[in-house]
Amino acid sequence: MQNCNKCLIIVLLVFTSFRLYSQKMTVLGYIIEDTDTIQGQVVDNKSNKNQSICLFMDQNGFAKKYKPDEIKAWGTFEGKHFRSVTVNENNISVQQFAQVLVKGFADLLVYHDKDGNERFFIRSNDNTYSEVTDPDSPKDSNKTKGRLIYLFKKSPELRVEISKSNFNRDNIIAFTSEYHLLNCPNEKCEIFIEKKRTPTMNFGIHAGVSFSSLRFATSEYQNLDNTYKTSFSPTAGLSGELSVPSLDERFGLRLELVFQTNSYVGDEVTFKMSTLRIPLYAVYHLGNMKNTLELYVGVYGGLNFNMSQTGVYIENPLHGLRITKEKLVEFPNKTLGFGISGGIGYLVPISKKQELILSMCYSKNWSNMLFRYYAEPIDHGSYGTWTETAINYDNSFLDFKVGLRF
């Protein structure tokens, strides 16, 4: 298990590289060059990246980055669509991708500028784009309403409704869809609004096997620091994972309970103990395919209890004390330690709400045992005393688990 100490470093490096790679996972999509629509895969990034660049891979596997002045539009088949529009930034006209909110007689698009302001564009049926928001005063709702009233001048009733209403994103979407119905009552108006995704909690159970090791710090006063064989034992536990898709759809926080019982056999000493680990992980789900990977790292508290030993003795005690093997050690019945943990999992959906998980995890924790032993003063006859000493130790675990999440 000494080589397992390197496993955690490897897991952390893989975790970091996969996190960076996960930002470039692709989904099915398309680009529009002039009048040609080319299907393939696109990268769906954060909104600020989606507005400035489109990373597209065609069906032959050729990848290319497209700027807003190189293509007319791009999108995903999951409902995100972007068009190239001219945006005035600090009195400089630049091409950027704006996201489509409404598609109909007049298309409504939104662009987020560098200050975080929402700026709206209307594409009329003559295929020209007009910015509804005043680029010099993007927070001035009255100017935005005035421009919208002018663009919808063919519908007097709607213009009156706009002038009396408060301006916000929901209202401008509603006004644009109503404008479509007034002009094209027999044609469908498409609205592309991402549903607000609330935090969700998933629970799971898992079981598997664990290879664990025990190691004590070197000392000349006891016989604990010998080599212990790797312990093999079954493991079982529960988990609960909180996902916050509004922050990052691939991110989650997972709390687990992991239980096992181990026996560590050394040259002179044998330890038996039950262990309860309670890790808290940061989890990243990688990819958008049917079967996906996840990486997780975190910290945990470990409780060793029902502890027993045979063969432990103290020798050469300090402070002029002597001890015999017959007057041995009072052993602690439980100890608490803290550690770090990381692993990788493979998820296989088996229904809409259930997933089968195959995982491998490496953990390491540090703790100490407070021994009490009976020792006799060398120069004071047979009267003895109980003495305490703390002995540091660590555990390592390599787990292979199968779980069900629901």
Image (cartoon, rainbow, N blue to C red):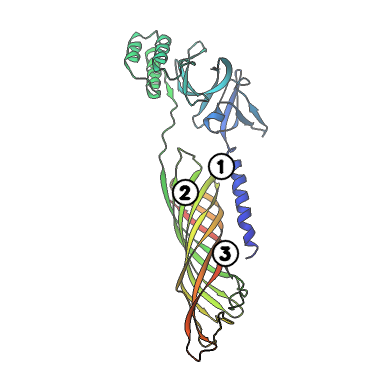
- The N terminus appears in which quarter of the rendering? bottom right
Residue at the image point whose x is 45% and y is 71% from the top: 334
Residue 185 visible in rendering: no
The amino acid type, in three-letter code, at marker 2 is Leu
- Mark seen at residue 287: 1
**How far apart are the alpha carbons under marks 2 and 1?**
18 Å
Contact, CB < 8 Å: mark 2 with mark 1?
no
**How far apart are the alpha carbons under marks 2 and 3?**
23 Å
The amino acid type, in three-letter code, at marker 3 is Ser
> Disc 2 or 3, which lies upstream in sequence?
2
Q: Residues within 10 Å of mark 1 (few under 14, many from 20)?
A: some
Secondary-structure class at tag 1 = loop
The residue indicated by pointer 2 is 253
Q: Which residue is nearer to you in this view: 194 or 213?
A: 213
Taking the image as shown, residue 17 lies to the left or right of residue 200, namely right
The residue indicated by pointer 3 is 396
Residue 114, percent from left and from top? 53, 25
- Mark seen at residue 205: none
The amino acid type, in three-letter code, at marker 1 is Gly
Foreground label between 2 and 1 = 2
Q: Which residue is nearer to you in this view: 25 or 30?
A: 25
Tell me: residue 94, above or below residue 322: above
Q: Residues within 10 Å of mark 3 (few under 14, many from 20)?
A: many
